[in-house]
Amino acid sequence: MCGGPSQAEKQAAADRRMETELAKAKAIEEKAEEKREDITDALTSRIKRKGLKGGGYGKRSLISSGSGAGFLKRFGS
């Protein structure tokens, strides 16, 4: 007469499942925190780099580029 798992076995299995779920949740939270830190670092470094460029240094206009051959010099009147 086998009646299935005993109450103690059921409780032990439930405890193991709970521990596993807690470990998974902790790992997910740690990974999420690392990603938040990485994103913050990336944004901070991007802002610093952008500030050092001096407002568009190195970019050229397609319409006119000073002494170069811009659109207006090529196709203008």
Image (cartoon, rainbow, N blue to C red):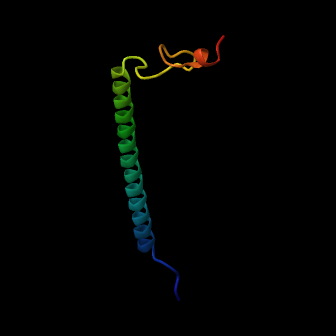
What residue appears at the point 64 percent right and 13 percent down from the top-left corner?
76
Lateral position of residue 73 relative to residue 22, left or right = right
Give the position of the C terminus as an image quadrant: top right
What residue appears at the point 41 percent right and 17 percent down from the top-left corner?
55
Residue at the extreme bottom of the image, as rendered: 1
Residue 19 x %, y %: 38, 60
Figure label count: 0
Residue 18 x %, y %: 42, 60
Residue 1 x %, y %: 53, 89
What residue appears at the point 48 percent right and 78 percent down from the top-left corner?
5
Picture quadrant where residue 58 is located: top left
Judge by depth and name the residue closer to the eye, 76 or 12: 76
Judge by depth and name the residue closer to the eye, 40 or 4: 40
What residue appears at the point 43 percent right and 64 percent down from the top-left corner?
17
Picture quadrant where residue 33 is located: top left
Residue at the extreme top of the image, as rendered: 77
Lateral position of residue 74 relative to residue 22, left or right = right
Judge by depth and name the residue closer to the eye, 61 or 47: 61
Judge by depth and name the residue closer to the eye, 4 or 34: 34
